[in-house]
């Protein structure tokens, strides 16, 4: 049967598929609109599958938190290009994906694919949306976090939508938790900027700390050589890099060394108790550079660098009349761990001409 322009227009509006594809679908399906729609869906999925070998390392982070700050979700949705990541259709897809993660409390991409969505599965809906956009798009990582009665969760997505963080703060009461919701967001903003990889120095694998120690100390020595050349103040060269290495014996030895130095300097012993704590704190600071770089609770808080994140949250809890501590966080950054393909344009052209 002959396909009319009105039919093509109707199918195009319903599916957002290219006009010639709509005409072909209607021709193949004898003008049956429903069958033509299915034909396009199947073709869209097939097109998506052909893109499977492409690398999707761009994209956006989606974030959703409940009004009572008791549950939150993050999802990373990847695209091939930054251009598509700015597309309104892509933004809508990210929004719908994080809402589905939030509603189903999924923490696994494969499980999310099988969840029910608008009369079908989420994977079917997602593939249809991807077919309209016309680029390889996939959701790679997703996480949900819930708070109990005396805890609160909140989060933050950076303005470029490439970094998202969720933070959980545990408190002594529901009242304190309610007051700490803004603080949880501030800590999430801190984590967005400072890139912690773990919650506390206690979480480090001892083998990892050991493997990092020599190289980090040598790096400080090298930096001091440059500082000396430029006549800048030198950095104290540490013996260690993490609080996990500062055993009671190590700290006791450091304290004795401080006291011995004070004695050599002729400082009266009666004032040592006013000097030793500050110098011991400085020793700890010099010997915990790994913690300050990678452990959230041990980093200097960006909103008040005189305190660590742990100290700042505890202070906020105290100001609210209770106690508070960060017990968990998740940070996602678009493209982490994805090896981007470096295109050789000349080789690509040569291959096509050959």
Image (cartoon, grey):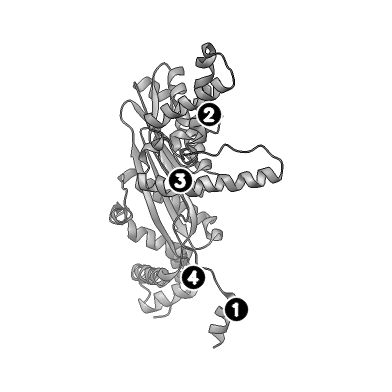
Residues at circles 2 and 1 in contact by the CB criterion of under 8 Å: no
- Dot 1, crowdedness within 10 Å: few (<14), some or many (≥20)? few
Quarter of the rendering occupied by the N terminus: bottom left
Q: Earlier in the sequence, mark 2 or mark 1?
A: 2
* Distance between the alpha carbons at the discs numbered 3 and 2: 19 Å
Q: Earlier in the sequence, mark 1 or mark 3?
A: 3
Residues at circles 3 and 4 in contact by the CB criterion of under 8 Å: no
| Residue at the far top in the pictured view | 270
* Distance between the alpha carbons at the discs numbered 1 and 3: 44 Å
Residue 213, numbered circle:
3
Quarter of the rendering occupied by the C terminus: bottom right
Q: Which residue is mark 4?
A: 18
Q: Position of residue 165 (x, y in %)?
A: 45, 42
Residue 346, numbered circle:
1
Q: Is residue 10 above or below residue 212?
A: below
Which of labels 1 and 3 is toward the front?
Answer: 3
- Dot 2, crowdedness within 10 Å: few (<14), some or many (≥20)? few
Residues at circles 1 and 3 in contact by the CB criterion of under 8 Å: no
* Distance between the alpha carbons at the discs numbered 1 and 4: 31 Å
In the image, 244 versus 73, the foreground residue is 244
* Distance between the alpha carbons at the discs numbered 3 and 4: 58 Å
Q: Which residue is mark 2?
A: 282
């Amino acid at each position: 049967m002959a396909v009319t322009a009105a039919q093509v227009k109707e199918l195009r509006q319903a599916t957002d598929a290219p006009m010639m594809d709509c005409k072909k679908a209607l021709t193949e399906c004898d003008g049956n609109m429903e069958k033509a729609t299915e034909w396009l869906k199947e073709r869209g999925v097939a097109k998506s599958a052909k893109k499977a070998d492409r690398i999707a390392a761009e994209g956006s982070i989606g974030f959703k938190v409940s009004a009572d700050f008791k549950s939150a979700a993050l999802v990373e949705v990847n695209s091939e290009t930054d251009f598509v990541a700015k597309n309104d259709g892509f933004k809508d897809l990210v929004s719908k994906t994080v809402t589905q993660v939030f509603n189903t409390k999924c923490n696994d991409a494969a499980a999310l694919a099988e969840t029910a969505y608008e009369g079908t599965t989420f994977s079917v809906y997602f593939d249809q949306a991807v077919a309209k956009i016309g680029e390889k798009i996939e959701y790679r990582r997703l996480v949900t976090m819930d708070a109990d009665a005396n805890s609160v969760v909140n989060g933050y997505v950076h303005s470029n939508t490439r970094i998202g963080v969720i933070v959980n703060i545990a408190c002594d009461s529901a009242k304190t938790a309610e007051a700490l919701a803004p603080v949880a967001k501030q800590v999430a903003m801190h984590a967005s900027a400072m890139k912690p990889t773990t919650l506390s120095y206690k979480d480090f694998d001892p083998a990892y700390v050991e493997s990092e120690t020599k190289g980090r100390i040598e790096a400080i020595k090298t930096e001091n050589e440059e500082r000396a050349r430029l006549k800048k103040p030198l950095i104290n060269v540490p013996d260690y890099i993490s609080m996990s290495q500062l055993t009671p014996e190590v700290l006791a030895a450091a304290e004795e060394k401080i006291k011995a130095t004070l004695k050599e300097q002729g400082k009266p012993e009666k004032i040592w108790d006013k000097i030793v704590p500050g110098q011991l704190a400085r020793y700890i600071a010099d010997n915990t550079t790994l913690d300050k770089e990678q452990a959230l609770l041990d980093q200097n808080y960006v909103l008040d660098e005189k305190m660590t994140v742990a100290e700042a949250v505890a202070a906020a809890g105290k100001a609210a009349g209770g106690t508070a501590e960060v017990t968990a966080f998740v940070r996602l950054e678009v493209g982490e761990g994805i090896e981007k393909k470096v295109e050789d344009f000349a080789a690509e052209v040569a291959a096509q001409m050959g």
